[in-house]
Image (cartoon, rainbow, N blue to C red):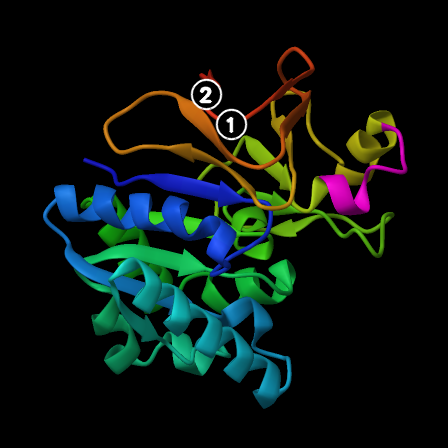
Amino acid sequence: MSGSLALVGSGEYLPAMAEFEKSLITDGIKNGRENTYIQIPTAAGQESQSRLKYWQDLGKAQGDLIGSKVIYLPIYNREDAHNLEYVNKVKNSALIYMSGGDPHYLASTLINTPLWSVILESWQGGSSLAGCSAGAMVLSSHIPNFRLSKSEPTPGLNLIPNIRVIPHFNKFFKWIPESAAKLLMHVPDDCVLIGIDELTAIVMRSNTDYWQVNGKAKIHFLKGIDPQQLIDGEIIRLNK
């Protein structure tokens, strides 16, 4: 039994996403998990302490709003990702949330660590797993280099190997053709390329075989299936 899996374009811990995040916690509780919300800020691990504190406080406020115990894990490097004190706190939580920042740093920090192993094990056992922006991008097999478009993609965590995500799609890609986005992502023909707008998510709920859109904007399917856009409540089946 796998838990719910959510890919979020932006908006982690914001009031606009509170009901969605609460629904992921509810999914985990239904699977026998504790009402605990795990914040994993690793993607922002190279940012300032004040910025990290901002994310910590924002997540705590969200947990208070939706009635869940929040555990912020200060995992900023690979040494932290091997710290069993942190690793053990992930177990049996209703929601594990990897927030935004640098996707390449997040992936290189978590690959082949006890932390990623316990995240994967917990999700497979019924915990909900969400990734926002960088946190969504790393779940694929490869991560594109937006700033160095001619560089090869870097390895991801490979949970959804044939799905590639462009977060913040309506903010950063609305001025360029979708055909250019496809080239920038270096997406193989057998992969599905998804653009996720801000304050919008696509989720596969526990024990289902389809993805559903949740949020204020759209999900854009750019490659791998028929080009289309979906809005809140609409569903689609993809080969994970």
The amino acid marked with disc number 2 is Asn
Count of residue discs? 2
Q: Nearer the viewer, mark 1 or mark 2?
A: 1
From the image, tell me which residue sits under label 2: 239
From the image, tell me which residue sits under label 1: 232
Q: What residue lies at 54% left-to-right and 42% top-to-bottom? A: 140
Q: Quadrant of the C terminus?
A: top left
Q: Quadrant of the N terminus?
A: top left
Q: Secondary structure at mark 1?
A: loop
- Residue range in magenta is 170-177
* 120 relative position to 184: left or right: left
Residue 166 x/y as whole percent: 67, 41
Residue 174: quadrant of the picture: top right
* Helix, strand or loop for the magenta stretch, by majority: loop
Q: Give neighbour class at mark 1: few <14, some 14-19, many 20+ (Cα, 10 Å).
A: some
Residue 24 x/y as whole percent: 31, 45
The amino acid marked with disc number 1 is Asp
Q: Say if 126 sits above or below 59 in the image.
A: above
Q: Give neighbour class at mark 2: few <14, some 14-19, many 20+ (Cα, 10 Å).
A: few
User: Which badge, 1 or 2, comes first in the chain's sequence?
Assistant: 1
Q: Secondary structure at mark 2?
A: loop
